[in-house]
Amino acid sequence: MVTERVVLLDDDGRPVGTELKRLVHSTSTPLHLAFSCHVLDAAGQVLVTRRALGKLTWPGVWTNSFCGHPQPDEPHEDAIARRAQDELGLTVRDVRVVLPHFRYRATDASGIVENEVCPVYLAVTDQEPRPHPDEVMETRWTDPAGLGDALRAAPWAFSPWFVLQAGQMPLYTPSAPEAPR
């Protein structure tokens, strides 16, 4: 088993060191590097996942397809491929950054803090997820615009980073209705 490390950042987002992943998330989590990925299928449906109950933060909460932390000197695209496989048994393609400067800080009900510079990516897969039970307890393919409506109506039902990301992504905005003829 690989010992995962996260890249610690200063307030300007510059790397200043590393720390073991298992030690970094606490009630005083330092700013660190992460990523989020939203996965689409060929029909344009987006994959949402429900976090496993054993997760340290936001257990059992619905969120974007997957998230992770690039290892020191690991390109984001490699980290995305690694986490897609580890969490969901997926191979992804057409990976592209959509929110390169996304940053957030949120505190879970348990007091654990997420404090991340977290570029957001879109990717495509041709596979059905095979979630790792320690990571994901449930998955759903859904219409992005309808999901956007749910995120706006009941933000407490989703991870805070997902709500913030979706609010900045046209993918989750319903198309304007056609004008009457």
Image: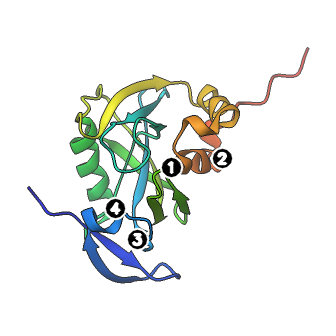
Marks 4/2 in contact by CB < 8 Å: the verdict is no
Q: Position of residue 75 (x, y in %)?
A: 30, 65
Q: Secondary structure at mark 3?
A: strand
Mark toward the start of the polypeptide (1 vs 2): 1
Frontmost of labels 1 and 2 is: 1
The disc placed on residue 109 is 1
Q: Which mark is residue 76?
A: 4
The residue where tag 2 is placed is: 167
Q: Nearer the viewer, mark 3 or mark 4?
A: 3
Q: Residues within 10 Å of mark 1 (few under 14, many from 20)?
A: few
Residue at mark 3 to residue at mark 4: CA–CA distance: 14 Å
Q: State if disc 2 and disc 3 touch (CB < 8 Å).
A: no
Mark 3–mark 2 Cα distance, whole angstroms, equals 22 Å
Mark nearer the viewer, 3 or 2: 3
Residue at the left extreme? 1
> Which of the two labelled residues, at mark 4 and mark 1, occupies the earlier sequence position?
4
**Quadrant (top left/top right/bottom left/bottom right) for the C terminus:** top right
Point out the residue furthest to the top here: 181
**Distance from the alpha carbon under mark 4 to that under mark 2:** 23 Å
For image coordinates 50% across by 49% down, the residue present is 109
Q: Residue type at mark 1: give it.
A: Ala
| Marks 3 and 4 in Cβ contact (< 8 Å) | no
Three-letter amino acid code of the residue under disc 3: His
Residue 32: which numbered mark, if any? 3
Q: Which quadrant is home to the N terminus?
A: bottom left
Q: Residue at x 32, y 29 (%)?
A: 126
Q: Amino acid at mark 4?
A: His
Describe residue 32's horizontal placement relative to residue 19 as left or right: right
